[in-house]
Every structure is written in structure tokens, then in C-alpha cells.
Image (cartoon, rainbow, N blue to C red):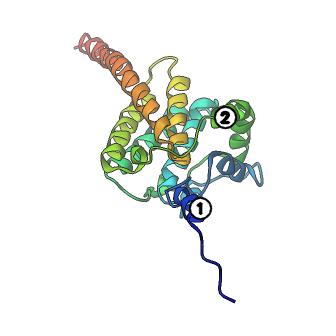
Amino acid sequence: MAEPEAGPDAAEAGGEDARPQRGPLGLRATIDTLCAGDPDERLELHGLVHDLGRSAFGVLLLLATLPALLPIPGLAGGLSGPLVVLVGLHLLLLQRKPWLPGFIARRGPQRSTVVRFDKRTDRFLRWLEKGIRPRLFWMIDHPVATVLSGLQLVLLGILLALPIPLTNYLFAGMLLLYALALIERDGGLMLVCWAAGTVAIWVFGALSGNLVAMLWAWIASFG
């Protein structure tokens, strides 16, 4: 029996579906997947981002925020900052998939850390998700937009790694929004991230520059 022809209404309904949609995993599915399993298991970064394509950058940023949002001794600046810089460099160079050096690929948070993050942020993220949706895809996929996002992430990662008092939560919150924009393919949210990132880079970049100048002046005083 011949299949009935799809009418114009069906073609029109399928037009929206032909556009790029969410990545392989949305935010909730990503967190649920990371939380499922042995709480004591270490989630190595290489295994987590394998075969995720461009969505892997959002997942890496999400994981990079964990040490800055949750007190993990010795990991806040030591892991988060360099990992954010690495993600930013990938975007800056228009890479399609992340490459992780071995000493970073073998590292990652324990699953219990992700569970703690989920419990602390679940209500906030569910509220935030109501306004997040795939839109303005050129803000995510266009080469110029990708380069700008990468440049901002490199600078924010450097600032996160610097010992600027009381800024871990601020930078981690901003990076979480970048991660959400990449995972959910929300160009509107990425616009918000660009605006907030520009302000933070100007304000705290100037502050960190003053701190470095003061440090060098203090060292020179011993000469």
C-alpha cells in the first residue's frame, strides 16, 4: 500500500524540527547522567566528554565550576581556572571536539561532588531552565561568535585562577551560565554571558592588574 503524501501542514510542522536543536544532552539529562552510579567513583574527564562533540565544551565548563562552587581543598584555582582556559582555547581555535592532555583527562570530580552540586542547585537550575531554550543558533555556532566566547572564557579562567578575594562564586556562577548556553544551545543566554563577561573582565582585570603591580613593587622593595 502506498504511503499517504505528507500535506503542506505536515511539511510546515517539520520545518522547525529541521533547525538545529539541543545538543545530545540537555542540562537536566546531563546532571542526571553524571549523578547515576557509585558515589565514590571518580568521573574522569576523558570518559565524560567522549563522543559529545561541541556539547562537550559545555559539559567541561559545568564540571569546571564544581570546585569553585563547592569547597574542595586545593582544586578551586588549581583545576577550575586552567580547565576553563583550556575550553576557551579550543573555542578560540574553532576546534570541533576537545583535546585533553593526559594529566587533565585522568582527573575529575567524584560522583558524590556532582550529587552535592545537584542538591544545592536543583531548585535554582529548574527555575532557570524555564527561560532557557534553543534559539539564536548563530550565537553558538558562528565562527566569530565562537571565537568571542573562547576569548572571554580564556580571560575569565585566568581571573578565576588568580587569588582575587571573594570572587570564586561570582566567576563560577558566570561560567555556569556559559555552560548552560552551550549545553542548551541558547544564543540569547550567550548574549547575556557576553555582556556580564565583558563587565567582569574590565572590572576585575583592572583590579588584578593593580594587585600584580603592588606585588612587584613589594618585591622590588627588598632589592
Q: Position of residue 150 (x, y in %)?
A: 37, 42
The earlier-in-sequence mark between 2 and 1 is 1
Q: Secondary structure at mark 1?
A: helix
Specify the label residue 125 is tagged with: 2
Q: Is residue 163 left or right of residue 219?
A: right
Residue position marked by numbered label 1 in the rendering = 9
Q: Is residue 173 left or right of residue 153?
A: right
Badge 1: residue crowd in 10 Å (few <14, some 14–19, many ≥20):
few
Question: Image height check: is 196 above or below 14?
Answer: above
> Would you say the residues marked 2 and 1 are in contact, meaning their CB atoms lie under 8 Å apart?
no
Question: Image height check: is 40 above or below 18?
Answer: above
Identify which residue, 147 or 118, lies in the foreground.
Answer: 147
Residue lying at 40% horizontally and 43% vertically, measured from the top left:
139
**What is the three-letter code of the residue carrying label 1?**
Asp
Q: Secondary structure at mark 2?
A: helix
Q: CA distance from mark 2 to mark 1?
A: 36 Å
Q: Position of residue 117 (x, y in %)?
A: 69, 36
Identify which residue, 142 or 67, lies in the foreground.
Answer: 142
Quadrant in the picture for the C terminus: top left
Badge 2: residue crowd in 10 Å (few <14, some 14–19, many ≥20):
some
Residue 123, quarter of the rendered image: top right
